[in-house]
Image: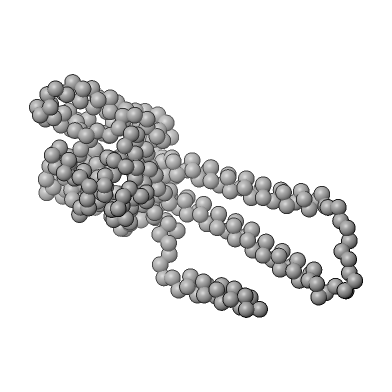
């Protein structure tokens, strides 16, 4: 009897706490098509599991009430039953159907979030190279030739294509209200697609443990109208200092930094990995800032003449790889 009341008190306490929450989970408050697809999968899974749990509890209560000992005579002996083929087929088929349904939902949603956001297939995406280091995020905009640290501005109503990689340990790039998380690694480039339907400010973070400072490896995401975004780009170009190789080396040192912006990107003197490209399906336009890369390499060769030939060779290969991979998302 005491156990029964303890269970009831626990249930009512949980219900009271949950109903008192004012803010919804950000992952269930999507502001873009990719995040909406992820939130739908979560809710479908929750409702499916809730149906299973409630059904099992109801059947359990029914069996306890129907076959309780006080209802039978003292000399009652249960009949000998060999089994029921129909029941065995039923409780075998139901789990198979549930697993098949959830598998179908998971596979279809995975293809959906890996592709260009629905409704944006005909638009040219804004390509941003997002690279992590302990414990900060670097965002390179080759189309605008600017770079930011620990904050991100994107236009609404336009697809955004992130090229993810790491300067060090594996990190996980995650903006809960705009897209699911994806790993950034130092030996390959992964691609993440998203789009923001609603202007506003969103939270982004590293969701993978990379040492004692990873909990503060967060960044702010601001979605602006296209006009406001163009104005912001113009302001950065007019006021931000240039990003030199020496300055970038300082930014890569482990530690926490505030937010900053620069003219130019590090893609020229510190290109992304040229190995396996994850999530690509074709070839196309070049958004890597090749025009700025050549100038950066000429500057680098003055300081490191003995590596000049090798650096130019690697950069040409990098530009070719990114040119091929960026066109892939327009062919989808």
- Residue at the outermost front position: 75
Percent across and percent down for residue 145 are 20, 39
Query: Could one spot residue 93 in this view of the protein?
Result: yes
- Residue 295 seen: no
Look at the picture and state if 37 lies above or below 167.
Answer: below
Q: In the figure, 218 relative to 284: above or below?
A: below
Image position, residue 274 (x, y; %): 31, 29
Residue drawn at x 83%, y 52% as measured from the top left: 84
Q: Residue at x 37, y 30 (%)?
A: 276
Is residue 58 rendered to the left or right of residue 180? right
Front residue of 207 and 313:
207
Which is nearer the eye, 150 or 115?
150
Q: Quadrant of residue 46?
A: bottom right
Foreground of the two, 22 or 276:
276
Q: Is residue 39 left or right of residue 290?
A: right
Q: Give the colour scheme of this rendering.
A: one colour
- The quadrant holding residue 9 is bottom right
Quadrant of the image for the N terminus? Answer: bottom right
State the count of labels. Answer: 0
Q: Position of residue 51 (x, y in %)?
A: 63, 60
Question: Could you tell me which quadrant the C terminus lies in?
Answer: top left
The residue at the point 43 percent across, 51 percent down is 35
Q: Indicate the position of residue 87 as horizontal and vertical percent values.
A: 78, 53
**Residue at the limit of the structure toward the left, as seen here:** 302
In screen coordinates, is 247 left or right of 53? left
Q: Residue at x 62, y 45 (%)?
A: 100
């Amino acid at each position: 009897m005491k156990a029964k009341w303890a269970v009831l008190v626990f249930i009512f306490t949980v219900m009271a706490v949950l109903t008192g929450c004012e803010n919804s989970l950000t992952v269930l408050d999507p502001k873009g098509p990719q995040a909406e697809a992820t939130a739908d999968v979560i809710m479908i899974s929750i409702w499916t599991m809730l149906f299973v749990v409630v059904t099992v509890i109801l059947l359990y209560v029914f069996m306890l009430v129907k076959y309780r000992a006080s209802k039978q005579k003292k000399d009652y002996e249960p009949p000998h039953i060999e089994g029921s083929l129909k029941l065995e087929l039923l409780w075998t088929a139901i789990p198979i159907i549930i697993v098949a349904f959830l598998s179908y939902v998971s596979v279809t949603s995975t293809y959906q979030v890996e592709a260009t956001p629905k409704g944006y297939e005909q638009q040219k995406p804004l390509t941003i190279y997002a690279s992590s280091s302990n414990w900060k995020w670097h965002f390179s905009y080759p189309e605008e030739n600017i770079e930011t640290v620990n904050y991100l501005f994107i236009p609404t109503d336009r697809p955004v294509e992130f090229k993810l990689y790491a300067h060090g340990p594996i990190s996980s790039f995650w903006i809960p209200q705009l897209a699911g998380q994806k790993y950034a690694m130092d030996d390959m480039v992964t691609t993440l697609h998203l789009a923001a339907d609603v202007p506003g400010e969103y939270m982004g973070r590293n969701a993978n443990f990379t040492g004692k400072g990873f909990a503060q490896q967060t960044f702010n995401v601001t979605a602006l109208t296209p006009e406001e975004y163009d104005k912001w780009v113009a302001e950065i170009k007019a006021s931000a200092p240039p990003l030199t190789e020496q300055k970038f080396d300082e930014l890569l040192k482990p530690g926490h930094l505030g937010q900053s912006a620069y003219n130019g990107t590090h893609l020229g003197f510190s290109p992304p990995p040229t190995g396996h490209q994850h999530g690509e399906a074709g070839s196309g336009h070049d958004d890597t800032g090749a025009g700025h890369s050549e100038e950066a390499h000429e500057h680098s060769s003055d300081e490191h003449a003995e590596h000049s030939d090798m650096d130019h060779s690697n950069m040409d290969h990098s530009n070719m790889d990114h040119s091929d991979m960026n066109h892939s998302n327009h062919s989808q």
